[in-house]
Image (cartoon, coloured by chain):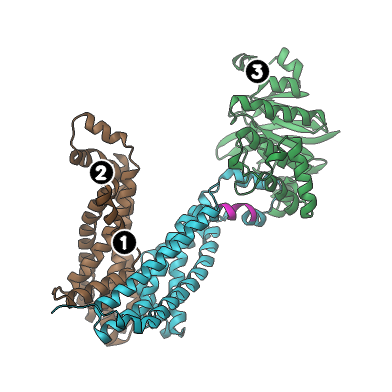
Chain colours: A cyan, B brown, C green
């Protein structure tokens, strides 16, 4: 059987694809936002003098990093309601991706903090900055610049991870492609379109981050 | 608790089979992926542009597409194209390609960090390029590749859960089947997460052991 | 008038005793240099005075106030972070490796302490910072990032950053050690100028000529103790301590 491409189907359904892409981006944005807060809190907690925050953060990071995201998503969506925590589909996905992102971003920020020279924080203390001022005006700016490249890769990979939302029937891009695939059997067109849209978005994010890196040159 | 143990006893073989398949799929895909990655990495580093450009494009494309899309696409496309692969086989194909693209980048990075003078030194003692690769360049690159390689192994174990979507009976799908029977979502999804954590912890420790061995050399 | 009084200062790093009971007084307007082999405790002494290190016993009195701790004996307690920060602002410190804030311009480096610690209005802080940059001869480099400056220029910015805070005491920790030889002069000239203006300074240095020519008094540290001290000219001309004689001979002065 010869297969002839029919991009009419894609044209007719392009709105769905765009909607799916936008939904995926929104999910990624929400999860990255919450994940960044978690990551910052955890990374700074490990700089405390006391040992227990580091140990706690270590357990969180290794537990999440060694568990598949899909298992976390299914656990939060199907198992948590058993304990009385009932979340909507979207909220439960964002929650899952956020704690997943938090673990990875903790590592990114921790590496960024490790790259802040000891002498520079000494200099900040020497002019009389308090701990909070030091973190705000000296450590954070250097840390952000240090982790810009790895933040970029992490953001992109988190955006790609929003494809897993399709598995709990959130109508994002992968879901739309699969739906078109099963409804019209335009298999090649459906997956080519979804792949291209993902690819283009990833390239766009990467380009944006490269611009950002250029705007803030290495010290 | 007793109820859970009872259900666990019933499900023991299913879980074990699932775990076994998960490990098998991960191992097979990292092996295939590493071979693809090695070839891609060498091509990207030392290939002339007619070779380098298409590899670069392919690697970048694959890295810009979510694994789940790769898995679904290879599953549906191959079936549709009349190539009859089982779910496991088409999943394995997708994971290997995914792994290959990532390893390709890693290996390129490691190879590029070796000074070019090493190639000159190899030529000077009369080695051909393939031999320089095998005896001079790759051994030096290994130290950088090892830790990331182990990491990729853990990533593949995690990515293998996505094969449950196309009906591969690995650990997650087995768990879903069990939960579908007894509705003990909290217990069995929790157990499933724990088992993955264990598998990956073992890989992590093996990796630390291996990198220590490599660091000593 | 005594500005800084250190009494019986001891400091351990684990089992290693770095300072074994240092006594030292510095008068207002005095320039005191500290010399000695590496590992003799010079830098640690300076870092203790700026409260970057805690110490095990003894006291440091700055302008009549014991700093770093409250209480004595077993009731001795390290002050809270806020209070330490306040006390650190009374002394200025210049480091061997400059330690400029890499993300801030030369001007920004000087302004940060003025606006956040001294709570000066932005405009006034900028004026003051610019005037300090002019004094170290770098007013044309105000908007440069540290990475765009030479080592000597970076160190002069660091000096301006410390001095702009109007500290009671300035601590200089081997400030020329990381510089290329041809850049040492410009930094030392800046310090000479400050000495002439009556800035109280405690200087750890390897530049023996500089110690002799600029410091009113020189201190020789050996094994965590002050082994000999006296007016610089006298100490260099007529050392008594055998280890100091040996040290000066090897320093070729």
Q: Mainly helix, strand or loop, the magenta region?
A: helix
**C-alpha distance separating marks 1 and 3:** 61 Å
> Chain letter of disc 1?
B
Label 3 sits on residue = C244
Q: Is residue C168 above or below residue C214?
A: below
Tags 3 and 2 both on a single chain:
no
- Place of residue C244 in the rendered image (x, y in percent of width and height, measured from the top left): 65, 18
- Residue C30 showing in the rendered view: yes
Task: Mark 1 vs mark 2: give the one in front.
Answer: 2
Residue under the image location 75 percent in, 38 percent down: C134
Q: Secondary structure at mark 3?
A: helix
Q: Quadrant of residue B177?
A: bottom left
- Place of residue B215 in the rendered image (x, y in percent of width and height, measured from the top left): 32, 42
What are the residue bounds of the magenta stretch? A137-142
- The circle on residue B138 is 2
Q: Is A140 part of what is drawn in magenta?
A: yes
**C-alpha distance separating marks 3 and 2:** 56 Å
Is the residue marked by circle 2 packed among few (<14), some (14-19), or many (20+) residues within 10 Å?
A: some
Task: Mark 1 vs mark 3: give the one in front.
Answer: 1
Label 1 sits on residue = B154
Task: Mark 3 vs mark 2: give the one in front.
Answer: 2
The answer to whether A188 appears left or right of A134 in the picture is left
């Amino acid at each position: 059987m010869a297969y002839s491409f029919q991009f009419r189907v894609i044209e007719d359904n392009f709105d769905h694809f765009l909607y799916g892409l936008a939904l995926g981006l929104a999910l990624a944005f929400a999860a990255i936002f919450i994940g960044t807060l978690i990551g910052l809190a955890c990374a700074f907690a490990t700089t405390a003098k006391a040992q227990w925050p580091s140990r706690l953060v270590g357990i969180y990071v290794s537990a999440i990093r060694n568990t598949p995201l899909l298992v976390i998503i299914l656990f939060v969506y199907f198992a948590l309601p058993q304990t009385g925590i009932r979340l909507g589909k979207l909220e439960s996905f964002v929650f899952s991706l956020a704690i997943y992102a938090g673990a990875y971003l903790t590592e990114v920020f921790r590496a960024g903090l490790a790259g802040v020279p000891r002498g520079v924080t000494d200099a900040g203390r020497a002019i009389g900055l308090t701990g909070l001022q030091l973190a705000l005006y000296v450590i954070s700016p250097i840390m952000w610049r240090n982790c810009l490249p790895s933040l970029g890769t992490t953001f992109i990979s988190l955006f790609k991870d929003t494809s897993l939302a399709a598995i709990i029937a959130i109508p994002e891009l992968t879901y739309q492609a699969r739906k078109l695939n099963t409804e019209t059997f335009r298999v090649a067109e459906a997956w080519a379109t979804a792949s291209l849209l993902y690819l283009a978005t990833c390239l766009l994010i990467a380009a944006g981050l490269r611009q950002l890196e250029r705007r803030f040159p290495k010290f | 608790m007793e109820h859970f143990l009872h259900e666990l006893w019933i499900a023991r073989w299913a879980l074990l089979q699932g775990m076994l398949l998960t490990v098998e799929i991960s191992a097979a895909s990292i092996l295939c992926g590493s071979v693809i990655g090695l070839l891609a990495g060498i091509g990207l580093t030392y290939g002339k542009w007619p070779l380098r450009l298409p590899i670069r494009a392919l690697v970048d494309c694959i890295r810009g597409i979510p694994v789940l899309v790769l898995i679904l696409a290879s599953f549906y496309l191959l079936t549709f194209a009349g190539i009859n692969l089982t779910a496991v086989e088409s999943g394995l194909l997708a994971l290997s390609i995914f792994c290959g693209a990532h390893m390709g980048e890693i290996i390129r990075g490691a190879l590029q960090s070796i000074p070019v003078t090493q190639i000159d030194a190899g030529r000077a003692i009369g080695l051909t390029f393939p031999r320089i690769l095998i005896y001079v360049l790759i051994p030096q690159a290994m130290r950088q590749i090892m830790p990331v390689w182990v990491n990729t192994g853990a990533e593949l174990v995690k990515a293998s859960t996505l094969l449950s979507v196309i009906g591969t009976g690995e650990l997650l799908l087995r768990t879903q089947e069990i939960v579908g029977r007894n509705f003990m979502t909290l217990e069995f999804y929790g157990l499933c997460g724990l088992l993955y954590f264990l598998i990956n912890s073992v890989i992590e420790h093996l990796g630390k052991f291996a990198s220590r061995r490599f660091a000593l050399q | 008038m005594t500005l800084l009084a250190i009494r019986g200062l001891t400091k351990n790093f684990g089992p290693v005793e770095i300072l074994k009971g240092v006594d030292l007084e510095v008068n207002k307007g005095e320039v005191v240099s500290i010399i000695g082999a590496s590992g003799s405790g010079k830098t640690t002494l300076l870092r203790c005075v700026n409260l970057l290190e805690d110490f095990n016993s003894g006291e440091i009195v700055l302008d009549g106030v014991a700093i770093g701790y409250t209480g004595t004996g077993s009731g001795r307690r390290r002050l809270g972070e806020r209070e330490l920060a306040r006390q650190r602002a009374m002394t200025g410190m210049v480091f061997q490796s400059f330690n400029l804030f890499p993300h801030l311009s030369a001007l920004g480096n000087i302004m940060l302490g003025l606006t956040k610690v001294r709570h000066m209005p932005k405009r006034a802080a900028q004026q003051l910072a610019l005037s300090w940059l002019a004094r170290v001869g770098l007013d044309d480099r105000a908007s440069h990032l540290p990475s765009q400056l030479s080592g000597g220029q970076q160190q002069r910015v660091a000096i301006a950053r410390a001095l702009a805070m109007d500290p009671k005491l300035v601590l200089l920790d081997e400030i020329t050690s990381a510089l290329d030889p041809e850049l040492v002069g410009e930094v030392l000239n800046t310090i000479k100028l400050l000495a002439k203006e009556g800035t109280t300074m405690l200087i750890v240095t390897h530049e023996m000529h500089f110690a002799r020519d600029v410091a009113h008094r020189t201190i020789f540290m050996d094994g965590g103790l002050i082994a000999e001290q006296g007016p610089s000219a006298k100490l260099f001309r007529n050392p008594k301590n055998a280890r100091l004689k040996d040290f000066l001979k090897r320093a070729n002065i």
